[in-house]
Amino acid sequence: MTSLRQGDIFAAGAQRLQMTESIELTIQSLQAYGADHAHWGLAWSGGKDSSATLTLIIWLIDTGRIKTPKTLTIFYADTRQELPPLAIAARQIMDELEERGIHVEVVTAPLDKRFMVYILGRGVPPPNNNTLRWCTRQIKIDPMTAALEQRLAELDGNVLMITGVRQGESAIRDKRIEMSCGKDGAECGQGWYQKVLPEAKGLKGRLATLAPLLHWRVCHVWEWLKHWAPQAEFGDWSTAMIADAYGGDEAEEINARTGCTGCPLASEDKALDTILLNPYWAYLAPLKRIKRLWRELREPHHRLRKAGIERLKDGSIAANPQRMGPILLESRLMGLEHILAIQTEINEAAIRLGRPTVDLINAEEEARIRELIALETWPDGWEGDEPTADTPLDKIYSDGAVQPLLFV
Ligand code: SF4
């Protein structure tokens, strides 16, 4: 028993030393690059990496460890798809920032481009890993680019955009920024902010990016969120909820990637599953049905298909004849009712238990989805009169060869 305790103390001591070193490197990177920029921006999604980055930087500024920039703008990327405990923690942190006189700009995609409206209203199939990953750019990058463009128009000079990209120990060796959000439990979108934003039209030449937590290991992120940042001496932040949402002290082993609720690109709902293990959040269990719905809506019987060779606008032939396309109107309606039912079920339980309610689809989004369906809206290149994707058709190859149906 005694030796175990001693071991724990040594382990904690080693952890602390590493944390201090990690923070020291962060300070050095901010001093080295931050000094050249009068204006700083911070891309915050409410996930673990960017929340650690945000709270640490404000603490470093508050305690005089780094020089205060002339302006600091916090951009909160609200995708409307955040896991509820993270969205709640983000709201609390926003209040804590406002108390310090720091304004947070909430960045959300325009109504028609939001995840739910785009899928259920316009009929674009849920993103997948193979052919169609439209989501990160549309709900995270493009709105952030627009917000930054607007901010840049108000400022002289360049802006240093700080992101929560993190690559752990390999970062010191490996200078390449990983775009995958699956690596080391990283946060979806942060790598894109790092790589894509400085090159974006309207921002090019006026934006530099810095990832001051690049070298942090995931255990340091948890340590900061759970044990350091909530203490008064480190800023008294409401970050413990973020760590708790991922399983508290066990979070390090779970190492969940953070992103949207029911992300169709993640093979498992690891973060949500961990949240549901916590009795406080167990009433959110119906959220598990969201990922299943996205899978279902990609099935052929919910979608249209091009019947034959497809000519593109420039007259060329599309590479994939008979490709599957948008979601049928009735399937979109089914999807909408499904999400609304999940929302009602959770919120009834929340009210009964005195827990926070969720906001998966708000009244404005629901009205717009119903309107787009009623208007029979189809994505570009589709008319709605194409056959459903489960209709047996002669097989057409990209060279125009036809193999007639063997069985009718
Ligand atoms: S978390 Fe998933 S659904 Fe959300 S933007 Fe990233 S890849 Fe797309």
Image (cartoon, rainbow, N blue to C red):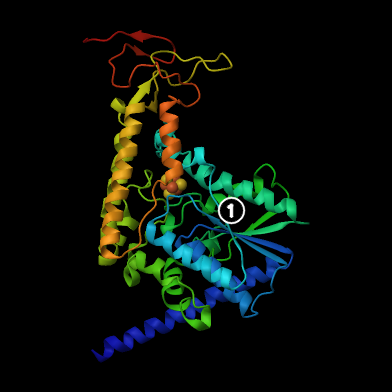
The residue positioned farthest toward the left in the image shown:
407
Quadrant housing residue 247: bottom left
Residue 131 visible in the displayed image: no
Cβ at disc 1 under 8 Å from ligand 1: no
Foreground of the two, 289 or 389: 289
Foreground of the two, 292 or 348: 348
Amino acid identity at mark 1? Gln
Residue 48 visible in the displayed image: yes
In which quadrant will I find the N terminus?
bottom left
User: x%, y% of residue 336?
Assistant: 34, 38
Residue 106, placed above or below residue 368: below
Q: Is residue 148 left or right of residue 123?
A: right
Foreground of the two, 122 or 351: 351
User: x%, y% of residue 22?
Assistant: 53, 73
Quadrant housing residue 31: bottom right
Foreground of the two, 98 or 248: 98
Q: Report the residue at 51% width, 49% height from top.
A: 179
Task: Count every numbered label the image shows and give the total.
Answer: 1
In which quadrant will I find the C terminus?
top left
Q: Is residue 156 left or right of residue 365?
A: right
User: x%, y% of residue 344?
Assistant: 30, 49
Question: Which residue has dot 1 on it?
Answer: 194
The residue positioned farthest toward the bottom in the image shown:
2
Looking at the rendered structure, the secondary structure element under dot 1 is: helix
Residue 196, placed above or below residue 367: below
User: x%, y% of residue 278?
Assistant: 27, 65
The residue positioned farthest toward the right in the image shown:
156
- Tell me the crowding category of disc 1: few under 14, some 14 to 19, or many 20 or more residues within 10 angstroms, Cα based: many
Q: Is residue 185 left or right of residue 286?
A: right
Q: Report the residue at 70% width, 57% height from top.
A: 159
